[in-house]
Image (cartoon, grey):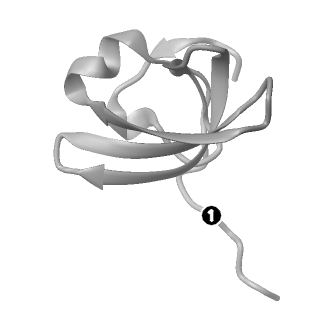
């Protein structure tokens, strides 16, 4: 999916690509932890590879766009 969609906090998932979190451009979400009406988002900058984190509130939703949907579940168990 390459369409950009204004994000709600619930749209930000591990593996999604979000614009508006870092000044350098889109980032890939590494982890998300929800705190009621806020979320701590850990991300990897796609241009530099650096990892960062940001506390995002509902009031920040209008500046965030999701350009690639993340995974709603993870299948990472050993076989």
Figure quadrant of the C terminus = bottom right
Against 75, residue 42 (above or below) is above
Residue drawn at x 69%, y 23% is 1
Quarter location, residue 29: top right
Q: Locate residue 12, reporting x and y percent.
A: 46, 37
Residue closer to the observer: 34 or 1: 34
Q: Residue at x 78, y 86 (%)?
A: 78
Q: Is residue 73 above or below residue 20?
A: below
Query: Is residue 42 shown left or right of residue 40?
Result: right
Element type where label 1 sits in the image: loop
Residue highlighted by disc 1:
74
Q: Position of residue 7 (x, y in %)?
A: 41, 22
**Residue at the extreme left of the image, as rendered:** 36
Is the residue 18 above or below the residue 14 in the image?
Answer: above
Tell me where residue 73 appears, x and y as whole percent. Answer: 56, 60
**Position of 33 relative to 74 (above/below):** above
Report the side of 66 relative to 27 (left or right): left
Classify residue 39 by image quadrant: top left
* Residue neighbourhood size for the residue with mark 1, other residues' Cα within 10 Å, grouped as few (<14), some (14–19), many (≥20): few
Which picture quadrant has residue 26?
Answer: top right
Between 18 and 50, the one lying in front of the other is 50
Name the spot of residue 24 as percent of width and height, x first.
66, 15
- Indicate left or right for 60 with 13 as reference: left
Q: Is residue 59 left or right of residue 39?
A: left
């Amino acid at each position: 999916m390459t369409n950009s969609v204004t994000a709600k906090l619930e749209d930000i998932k591990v593996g999604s690509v979000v614009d508006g979190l870092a000044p350098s451009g889109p980032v890939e979400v590494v982890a998300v932890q929800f705190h009621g009406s806020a979320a701590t988002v850990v991300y990897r900058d796609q241009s530099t590879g650096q990892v960062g984190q940001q506390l995002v509130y509902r009031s920040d939703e209008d500046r965030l766009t999701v350009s690639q949907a993340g995974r709603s579940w993870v299948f990472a168990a050993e076989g």
